Image (cartoon, helix red, strand yellow):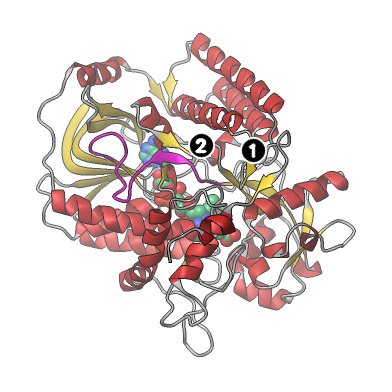
């Protein structure tokens, strides 16, 4: 066991973690240093895959937009379950973070007049999404933030290092984290004044997801195990249009901005169907479009529908969406006939670790930012491209909090923390090899969640899922397998799956991304919630 101490430890190197690290890198307040740890290499999260872009509310240059209109769209998409203070906070800080990203060196796409080019996505009433190199927004932002961070050279970076357990004492204060370094093969107890979880999403608990392999809900599971409050766990977002491919652990995405630029969903008969389900048709909120596709697939006994891109023009599509074009080529999909086979897939998690506007969790000195946090911005369904914005806005604010406080690493630890460290001291055998048995159990979890706890849910299905998952748990604990990365990830995924199912069982109505076929009347409370807002 190795030991170290820091002022701040950031866990996760997606856009939220990198943005925060860059801001802290410039401060001289941290005499014991700032550490960024990440499970694989720096580029491993969902952020680098982001295609559509980042919401940027800049009415000074985008005359059709306003903060009020972004707030309204966010609340309507979230069906009124959003926290107004979080929505306002994000919207009002949007222009500032767009400018800051530009200052970091991010080049957003411009139009023929050399003005910022705003695109449209589902449920937005006006184009307000900035993008980079067409559909490579996440990659460009991550590359820029990584490059900046490496230049400053003031933040320590541990790659291939997995956070395993938070060191939370009897008085509910987080004093550090135990990690495992896969490359050097040792455990390390890192003591720190503040710990920031930036561990991203949960997609790998589902069979069909757009999320990368690292998205196994670790941060949420660790925080919950340490008794942090979690909330909104029933709200899982399914993107309507992942590329239809068999047996892929991460499905390539076909951005909603393709529909923003004119592509249309058609069934196998070639009929445009979206209008039948919502007045905004192909650009209705994601939950509506995803359910419409499921309905069409059921009607035609098909595993996919088609996205008709001929409206955009194939050549123009190739230029505007180079990433999607190469994803199609890599998966042997020929786009020259104008049709791309697509199906819904898990994409984003609205729930997570409950935080306030300073990203503070319910455990002292523990913060959460990005997708693992529940800030209240999204309500029952996230508005497209609000996630990268949320990552940046909350990371920006948290940097101010941490710089102002500049706390020293802890010096005293109670029995509870000593016991946790002792457990890992004794754990001499930790494998990073894939284990076939754990892999089988993981696949069982994924199939169960996809079958019973996805776009359409029922009490019967959810209860069945709970039974299957409890049985998987028993089999893990009976197996006497040695500790391994995959086993930790599976246990984390199980904890969070159970929380999702519990919350889904408790919510006996249909709202946003949570649809119960046994309570089929969909509540649309967004407009009502917006109308009640103070002017
Ligand atoms: P991530 O970027 O997922 O990063 C999480 C990090 O935590 C990773 O570095 C991971 O390795 C690390 N980590 C996880 N567990 C551990 C552990 N135990 N120990 C150490 N490190 C750990 N949103 C938009 O707003 N606009 C878009 O255009 C858009 N497109 C998307 C396209 C795709 C394909 C996907 C999957 C998502 C998209 N989203 C988009 C959503 C958005 O990308 C994510 O919500 C956002 O990037 C999450 O950022 P993050 O920093 O919270 O986490
Ligand atoms: C997309 O490009 O469709 C994804 C955007 C998002 O998830 O916000």
- Above/below status of 292 relative to 494: below
Q: Horizontally, is 206 left or right of 289 in the view?
A: left
Residue occupying the point 59% across, 52% down: 525
Q: Give the quarter of the figure containing the N terminus.
A: top left
- Above/below status of 354 relative to 1: below
Q: Horizontally, is 359 left or right of 209 in the view?
A: left
Question: Label 1: which residue?
Answer: 509
Picture coordinates of residue 180, whole percent (x, y) = 33, 31
Look at the image and say whether residue 363 sits in the magenta stretch.
Answer: yes
Front residue of 63/147: it is 63
Q: Going from the N terminus, do you reach mark 2 or mark 1 first?
A: 2
- Above/below status of 332 relative to 246: below
Number of residues whose C-alpha sits closer than 10 Å to that of mark 2, classed few (under 14), some (14–19) or many (20 or more): many
**Total marks in image:** 2
Report whether residue 383 is seen. Answer: no
Question: Label 2: which residue?
Answer: 233
Image: magenta residue range: 348-366
Front residue of 180/24: it is 24
The residues bearing labels 2 and 1 have C-alpha atoms spaced at a distance of 15 Å
Mark carried by residue 318: none
Picture coordinates of residue 327, whole percent (x, y) = 63, 59
């Amino acid at each position: 066991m190795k030991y170290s101490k820091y002022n701040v430890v950031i866990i996760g190197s997606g856009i939220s973690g990198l943005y925060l690290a860059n801001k802290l890198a410039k401060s001289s307040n941290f005499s014991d240093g700032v550490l960024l740890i990440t499970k694989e290499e720096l580029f491993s999260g969902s952020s680098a895959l982001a295609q559509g872009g980042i919401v940027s509310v800049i009415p000074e240059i985008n005359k059709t937009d306003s903060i009020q209109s972004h707030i309204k769209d966010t609340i309507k998409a979230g069906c009124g379950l959003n926290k107004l203070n979080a929505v306002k906070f994000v919207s009002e800080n949007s222009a500032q973070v767009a400018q800051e990203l530009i200052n970091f060196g991010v080049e957003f796409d411009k139009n023929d007049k050399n003005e910022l080019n705003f695109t449209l996505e589902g449920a937005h009433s006006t184009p307000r999404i900035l993008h980079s190199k067409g559909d490579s927004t996440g990659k460009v932002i991550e590359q820029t933030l990584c490059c900046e961070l490496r230049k400053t050279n003031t933040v320590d970076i541990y790659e291939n290092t997995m956070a395993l357990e938070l060191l939370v004492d009897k008085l509910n204060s987080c004093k550090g984290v135990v990690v495992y370094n896969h490359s050097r093969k040792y455990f390390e107890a890192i003591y720190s004044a503040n710990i920031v979880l930036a561990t991203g999403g949960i997609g790998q608990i589902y069979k069909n997801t757009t999320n990368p392999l690292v998205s196994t809900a670790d941060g949420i599971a660790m925080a919950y195990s340490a008794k942090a409050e979690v909330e909104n766990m029933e709200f899982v977002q399914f993107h309507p249009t992942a590329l239809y491919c068999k047996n892929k652990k991460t499905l390539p995405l076909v951005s909603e901005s393709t529909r923003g630029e004119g592509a249309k969903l058609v069934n196998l008969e070639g009929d445009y169907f979206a209008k039948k389900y919502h007045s905004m048709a192909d650009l209705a909120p994601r939950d509506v479009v995803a359910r419409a596709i499921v309905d069409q697939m059921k009607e035609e006994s098909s595993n996919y529908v088609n996205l008709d891109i001929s409206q955009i023009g194939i050549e123009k599509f190739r230029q505007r969406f180079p990433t999607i074009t190469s994803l199609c080529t890599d998966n042997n999909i020929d786009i020259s006939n104008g049709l791309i086979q697509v199906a819904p897939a898990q994409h984003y998690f609205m729930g997570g670790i409950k935080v306030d506007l300073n990203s503070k969790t319910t455990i002292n000195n523990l913060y959460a930012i990005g997708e693992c946090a529940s800030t209240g911005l999204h309500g029952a369904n996230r508005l497209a491209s609000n996630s990268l914005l949320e990552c940046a806005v909350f990371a920006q604010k948290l940097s101010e909090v941490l710089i102002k406080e500049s706390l020293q690493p802890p010096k005293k630890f109670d029995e509870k923390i000593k016991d946790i460290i002792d457990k890992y001291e004794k754990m001499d055998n930790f494998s990073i090899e894939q284990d076939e048995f754990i892999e089988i159990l993981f696949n069982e979890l994924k199939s169960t969640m996809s079958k019973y706890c996805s776009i359409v849910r029922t009490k019967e299905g959810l209860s069945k899922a709970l039974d299957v998952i409890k049985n998987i748990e028993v089999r893990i604990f009976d197996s006497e397998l040695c500790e391994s990365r995959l086993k930790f990830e599976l246990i984390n995924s199980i904890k969070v799956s159970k929380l999702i199912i519990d919350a889904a069982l408790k919510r006996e109505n249909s709202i946003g991304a949570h649809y119960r076929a046994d309570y089929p009347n969909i509540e649309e409370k967004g407009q009502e919630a917006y109308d009640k807002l103070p002017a």
